[in-house]
Image (cartoon, helix red, strand yellow):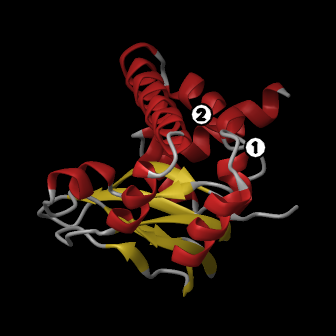
């Protein structure tokens, strides 16, 4: 499967060839090693990235060093600390590579310059913001209404084929349960299936 930022965009909005060429000219390829941050907490991010290969997580850390995984992003996903870019402030979370990864990176201000030339970019951005809002709303609903087992089932449905690519303590953190609780839950579900 061809994972490229321009293919990702064209799946959402019709992109004239001239705009695609200008967009591609703004992209750079970056390799990120497993364990390395694409964006670190406290950093003022200026870029967004498309995951060509690899896997990432967004996570928060408290003063005691405890980590809270917010979300996972496999191939064909966008990475950004969007609110930090828009508000020109430090990121509240880090984006960490969970595997050796390759991303296509674009400077957000340079990307915005394309918007004056072609209104389709607004459609693309609106689609991304809507998708992000829906995912955030669903995650909040699950924490308010779902027990741990339902949250785990939802994780498996949202991220098919990722469970073996992610360390169990990170999945537990995403579910807001202990690794021991996740182990018990997995054993219980294996007995039921």
Task: Using residue 188 as the reference point, say whether residue 37 is left or right of it.
Answer: left
Q: Nearer the viewer, residue 156 or 100?
A: 100
- Give the quadrant of residue 93: bottom left
Q: Nearer the viewer, residue 17 or 128?
A: 17
Locate the C terminus by quadrant: top right
Q: Is residue 75 visible?
A: no
Q: Mark 1, mark 2: which one is toward the viewer?
A: 1
Q: Position of residue 83 (x, y in %)?
A: 25, 48
Task: Check disc 1 and report the residue beneath it.
Answer: 160
**SS of the residue at dot 2?**
helix
Point 71% across, 48% down: residue: 10
Task: Using residue 47 as the reference point, say whether residue 89 is left or right of it.
Answer: left
Q: Position of residue 82 (x, y in %)?
A: 32, 52
Task: Check disc 2 and report the residue beneath it.
Answer: 152
**Count of residue discs:** 2
Q: Position of residue 14 (x, y in %)?
A: 70, 41
Locate the N terminus by quadrant: bottom right
**SS of the residue at dot 1?**
loop
Mark sitting on residue 139: none
């Amino acid at each position: 499967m061809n994972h490229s930022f321009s293919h990702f965009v064209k799946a959402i909005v019709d992109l004239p060839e001239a705009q695609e060429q200008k967009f591609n000219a703004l992209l750079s390829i970056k390799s990120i090693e497993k364990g390395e941050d694409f964006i670190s907490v406290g950093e003022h991010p200026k870029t967004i990235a498309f995951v060509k290969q690899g896997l990432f997580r967004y996570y928060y850390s408290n003063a005691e060093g405890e980590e809270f995984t917010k979300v996972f992003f496999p191939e064909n996903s966008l990475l950004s600390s969007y609110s930090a870019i828009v508000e020109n402030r430090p990121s509240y979370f880090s984006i960490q590579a969970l595997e050796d990864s390759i991303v296509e990176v674009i400077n957000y201000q340079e990307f915005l310059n394309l918007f004056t030339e072609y209104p389709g970019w607004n459609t693309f951005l609106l689609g991304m913001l809507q998708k992000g809002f829906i995912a955030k709303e669903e995650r909040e609903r699950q924490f308010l209404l779902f027990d741990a087992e339902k949250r785990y089932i939802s994780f498996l449905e949202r991220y098919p084929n990722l469970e073996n690519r992610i360390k169990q303590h990170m999945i537990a953190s995403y579910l807001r349960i202990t690794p021991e609780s996740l182990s018990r839950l997995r054993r219980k579900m294996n007995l039921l299936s």
